[in-house]
Amino acid sequence: MRPVLLVIVILVFSINFSTAQQGEALHPIVKGFGGVYEIEDAVEIPENKKTKLLIDLTKAETNRSNPDAEPDFSNPIWGLINTARLLNLHGVGGVSKENLEVILVVHSKAVMSLLANETYQDFFETKYDNPNLPILEALHKAGVRIVVCGQSLLARSIKKDQLFKHTEIALSALTTISKRVQEGYVVYNF
């Protein structure tokens, strides 16, 4: 069943938006981020039932067309935008916010997206605030649990008070993912 779901997600994300109905991007679940469009005559739409999603966020790409480019300090990482899109696609498809149970598990290079502004500025030697914080706040308001790998924090000498205020710390991302898969979560890797 997972391969079929993955194919469906890839197809949805690959749709040429010229087939989208005219109008503004919609943000039914995550306000202000990850805008999506209704698709006329769509044959695959989600059901409005309890849906458990786990986003395994490891990449810190800010430039989707050139993943090896230097970080763009004015944009959030692509995986956070795609997380918002995933939730909004479910919303446009008719899944209510109350039926979405979402955990964002952050580890590897993506851990830096969780840094509070001062720590972010010091680490990247930039004057810019962390551009990921507004989308993280919107995801939190949409009911997403934001969990960071404790092992990744330890490897980078990052403390809890240096992180986005709504971040929870797990023993590890790997054990969190294995536990949640056993509980029926569908895993997306961004």
Image: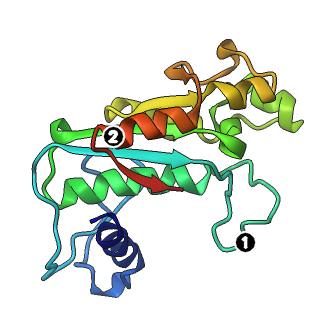
Q: What x and y, as percent, mark residue 125?
A: 89, 36
Direction from residue 85 to residue 176 in the image, left or right: right
Secondary structure at badge 2 equals helix
Residue in the image at 34% along x and 87% along y: 18
- Determine if residue 104 is in view: no
Name the amino acid, label 1: Asn
Look at mark 2 in the image and give the residue it sits on: 182
Mark 2: amino acid: Gln
Q: Nearer the viewer, mark 2 or mark 1?
A: 2
Tag 1 residue: 66
The label number, if any, that marks residue 135 in the structure image: none
Tell me whether circle 2 and circle 1 mark residues in contact (CB < 8 Å).
Answer: no
Task: Classify mark 1: helix, strand or loop.
Answer: loop
Task: Please tell me which residue is depicted at 65% across the width and 15% down the height of the picture.
Answer: 160
Front one among 41 and 10: 10
User: To which quarter of the image does residue 37 belong?
Assistant: bottom left
Residue at 79% in and 29% down: 155
Q: Residues within 10 Å of mark 1 (few under 14, many from 20)?
A: few
Answer left or right for 135 relative to 161.
Answer: left
Whichever of callouts 2 and 1 sits on the residue coming sooner in the sequence is: 1
